[in-house]
Amino acid sequence: MVGKSLALIKQSFHELPAALFELTELEELDLSENKLTTIPESIGKLKNLTKLDVSLNELSIFPTSLTQLKELRVLNIIDHNLTTIPDAIGEMVELKGLGLSYNQLTVLSPAIKQLKKLKLLDISRNNLTSIPDAIGEMVELEVLWLNYNQLTVLSPAIKQLKKLIYLDVRGNPFTVEGLRSVMELNDKIHRVDSDVPEYCISRRNYLLITCGSGAVKNDVMKINL
């Protein structure tokens, strides 16, 4: 334990030790790369947590116990078998960064619109076929990863995200209409990464959509959460 941070990575935990929940001063906790199948209600005792990483465990259901963590700013639940996110996610109103990539999500709860402070949302590499229009109410969103899902068209509500500076939609099976929806966003967002050919001719003008690079992810992670 360093200061108010604790990393329990690769400890082969099937369940969390009871002593952990007595460390009520903890602000950052990394439980990644264990064998956890659930997160107990006792996690609620860690009321000062602002960052939590439970990536690379064995969760199949989103732990609603996490909604007790009212001060949480950053939550990563990456690389599990989650298929849905409960409406209770809307209770985590202090979240500024949420990582849900490499799961099996097929639908995104409209309750996510209640995360008014969220700046970064990574729901890449899931099985999402649509994005709810409620996303347009996430007014602070700056970075959105939707790449490698099953999207055929983008929600027009994305146009309402006035602070969005980066959008990644590569690896989706867009229809012609879906490609148009991507092209329309290019003039509204600082950077859009997609599989659309670099130069696309429209009836009015030429639209330039840049193809992605790994460096972008490093840059946007510098956003202050």
Image: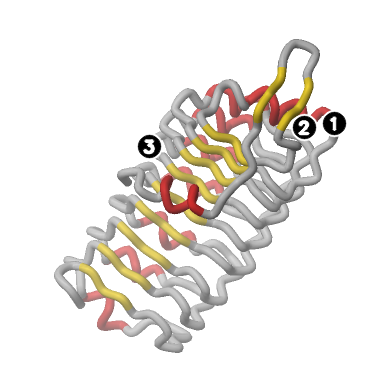
Q: Which mark is residue 179?
A: 2
Q: Is residue 1 above or below residue 151?
A: below
Query: Which residue type carries mark 1?
Result: Val
**Is residue 189 rendered to the left or right of residue 170?**
left
Number of residues whose C-alpha sits closer than 10 Å to that of mark 3, classed few (under 14), some (14–19) or many (20 or more)? some
Residue pointed to by mark 3: 117
Label 1 – label 2 distance at C-alpha: 5 Å
- Measured as percent of width and height from the top left, residue 138 is found at 48, 32
Q: Residue at x 72, y 54 (%)?
A: 127
Residue depicted at 33% across the width and 84% down the height? 17
> SS class of the residue under badge 1?
helix
x and y percentages locating residue 173 in the rendered image: 80, 45
Secondary structure of the residue carrying numbered label 2? helix
Left or right: 224 in relation to 183: left
Mark pair 3, 2: CA separation: 29 Å
Mark 3 / mark 2, whichever is N-terminal? 3
Above/below status of 126 relative to 112: below
Given this view, does label 1 or label 3 mark the residue nearer the observer? 1
Name the residue that disc number 1 marks: 176
